[in-house]
Image: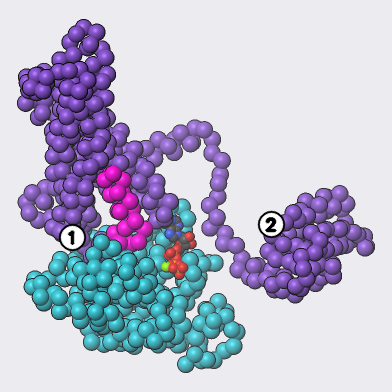
Amino acid sequence: MNKTDAHITIKDLTMAYGSFVVMRDLNFTIGQGDVFIIMGGSGCGKSTLMRHMIGLQAPARGQVLYGDLSFWEAEPAEQDRIMKRVGVLYQSGALWSSMTLAENVALPLEQYTDLSPSQIREVVSLKLSLVGLAGFEDFYPSEISGGMRKRAGLARAMALDPDTLFFDEPSAGLDPVSARRLDDLILELRDSLGATVVVVTHELASIFAVGNNSVFLDPETKTMIAGGHPKKLLEECEDPRVHSFLTRGEETTGGALE
Amino acid sequence: MNSSMEASSAAGELSISRPSDNTLLLRLAGSWKMGQALPSANEVEKQIESGPGIERIAFDTKELSVWDTGLLTFVIKVRNLCSQGEIQLDSQGLPEGARQLLALASAVPEKKGARGETVRESFLSQVGEDAIAFARSSREMLDFIGEASIAFFRFLTGRAQFRRSDLILIIQESGAQALPIVSLISLLVGLILAFIGAVQLMLFGAQIYVADLVGIAMVRVMGAIMTGIIMTGRTGASFAAQLGTMQVNEEIDALKTLGVSPMEFLVLPRMLALVLMMPLLCLYANLMGILGGFIVGVGMLDLGLMEYYNQTKAGVGLDDLAIGLFHGLVFGVLVALAGCLRGLQCGRSASAVGDATTSAVVTGIVSIIVATAIITVLCNVLGI
Ligand SMILES: Nc1ncnc2c1ncn2[C@@H]1O[C@H](COP(=O)(O)OP(=O)(O)OP(=O)(O)O)[C@@H](O)[C@H]1O
Ligand SMILES: [Mg+2]
C-alpha cells in the first residue's frame, strides 16, 4: 500500500432519502493513489454513497472531505474546482444520447482545455481505443450494446486525466476478457497518472485483483462493518457476513480465490 | 418443476383432516397450477380459528399430480397463518422441489422499512402537507426562473456554454417542422371565426366586417394563442420528455459532475429556439388565419377579392400586430420554461417521464391563458 496522505475522508456520514435512512455513521479514509473498493449486497447504498462523494446528493449528516476541505460546506466555486479533477463512470453509462461517442468524450475536453479540434480528435481516438472501442467514434449511444456503452462512459470519465476516478460497477455487463482488461486499465491509470480510483463493485475477481483498500456496507445494521485491504479482510475478518460475501456464500475459509 | 408429467388431471383439491388433536393435515390432490381455480387458504384459516389447540400443520401430497407457483403461494399463505398463530409448519410432506424453493424464498429476510409505510393521516395534516408541498414547488419554480434568467444574461454577455449545433437542431425541430400543423390549425380557426361572424353579421347586412373580425382577432391574440397551445403540446412536451429521459439515464448527473450547468447546456438553447421561433410562427399563423377568413368571405359571402383585402388592411393596425407578436414572444418563454422545468424535476422512472410530460403540457397551457389575461388587461389599462 502506498498510503501517502488522505485524499478523501468520510466523517460520520449519514445518507438518507427523505426519512428513509440508507446508511449511517460511515467513517473511512481513501488515500492518495488507492484503488478503493466499495462493496456490499445489491441495494445497500453503494451508488448512493458514490453520489455523496461526487457532489450530487447532500449528506443528511456528516462530512465528505477532499484533502482538508469539506465539500458540502465549501463555496460553489470551490466545489466546481474539486469536481473538475474528478471523472465519473455511472452505473448506466449515462452517455449523452444526442451526441456520438466521439462528441461525448470530446465535450469535457472542449469545456476545460484549449486544444484544437484536431488535437481533440486525436485524444478522443486514443481514449476510445484504450477501452477497446476504436472505430466507433461516429456511433450514437443507442447504436451500441450495453457493455460498449459502459466502456464508452469509461473513456469519457478518463478524458481529462482526472486525479480521482469513480467507477460504479464498471465490469457489470462485460465479458470476462473485457472485465480483465478493465482491471488492468484501472491499475495502469493508478500507476501512470497517479490517480486515486474508487470502484463500486461486487465482482470478487476484480475486488481481489485491483483493490488495496475497501469498505463493506451492511444493509441489516445500516452501517459499515468492515474495511481495509480485501485480501487481509478475507484472511482476518471474523465477521460471517463479510466472509460469506468474499467467498460467494461458501463458508470455507482460506484464500480460495487467490 | 412439475413433480410428474402426467396429463393434466383433476383440478386441485384440498381436504383437511385432524389425525390427532393438535395436528391439522392438509391433503392436496390433483393439479395445483397457476391460473386454475385453486382452493384458498381461507379454509385452513377457518379451521385454525374454529378449534384451538392446533400446534402443527402437516401436508400430504401423495395424490398431487402437477404443481407450480400456484402451490407455493398457497403454502406461503399457510406459513404466514402459522407464524401468526405460533403453529409449527411441517413441510416434510411437500414435494422436494417445492421445499427447496420455499427455503430460497425465505433465505433473505424482508427488509424492514424498505416497504413504504402508509400511515393514514388526518384531514388537517394532509392539508398542511399539501400547503407545504405547494410552497416548496412554488419556490422551486421561482428558483428555476431565476437560474434561467442568469443563464440568459450569461448568454447575452457571451459566456454561456452550449453547443451551437444543438441550438440549430432545436430551431429546426420546433420551427420549420411545426409549419404544417400550424398552417392547418390556424387556417381552420380563421375559417371558423369567419363562419360564426358571418352568421351574425349577415343579419345586419354587414358581412364586410367579417374581414375586420377575423383580421383583428387572429392578429391580436388568436394566432398567438393557437400557436402557443400547439407548441405546448408539440415542443413543450418533447422538451419535458427529452430532459426527463436524460434525468432517468443519469445524463444530467454526468453534466453536473463535469461542471457543465444543465441550465446553460440544455435549457438555454431550448429557450432561445422558442423565443426566436414563436414570433415567426405567430406571424405565419396570422397570415393563415386571415387566409381562412378570406376563403369564407370571398367564397361564401360573395365579397370582392380587393374589397376583403382593403377592409382587412384598414381594420388591422400595426399595434395589433405588435401585441400579437409580443404574446408570441412571451408564450415562447413560457412553453420552453414549463417543458424544461418539468423535465428537470422528473423522477427516475419511465412513469415519472410520463408525469413530467403531462405536467409540462398542463403548466404550459395554464400559463399561456393566464399570461393572455394579464396582457389583455394591461393593454386595456394602457389603452392600446
Ligand atoms: N431516489 C430514491 N428515493 C428513495 N430511495 C431510494 C432512491 N434511490 C435509491 N433508494 C434506496 O436506497 C437504497 C440504496 O440504493 P443504491 O442505488 O445506492 O443501491 P446500490 O448499493 O447501488 O445497489 P446496486 O448494487 O444494485 O446498484 C435502496 O434500498 C433503494 O431502495
Ligand atoms: Mg448501484
- Residue B66 in the figure: left or right of residue A129: right
Q: Is residue A200 magenta?
A: no
- Above or below, A169 against A62 in this view is below
Return the x and y of residue A88 as percentages of the image width and height.
29, 70
Within 8 Å of ligand 1, the CB of disc 2? no
The one of B233 and A78 positioned closer to us in this rendering: B233
| Stretch in magenta | B234-253
Q: Main secondary structure of the magenta part?
A: helix
Tell me, for residue A77, which label it has, or none.
Answer: 1
Q: Would you say residue B115 is visible in this rendering?
A: yes
> Could you give the CA–CA distance between mark 2 and mark 1, rounded to whole angstroms?
61 Å
Q: Residue at x 7, y 54 (%)?
A: B158
**What residue is disc 2 on?**
B35
Q: Nearer the viewer, residue B184 or B349?
A: B184
Q: Disc 1: which chain?
A: A
The residue positioned 67% from the left and 71% from the top of the image is: B101
Q: Whole-percent x and y of residue B274?
A: 18, 44
Q: Can you tell which chain is drawn purple?
A: B
- Which tint was used for chain A? cyan
Task: Give the residue type at disc 1.
Answer: Ala
Q: Quadrant of residue B136?
A: top left
**Horizontal and vertical percent position of residue B151:** 16, 50
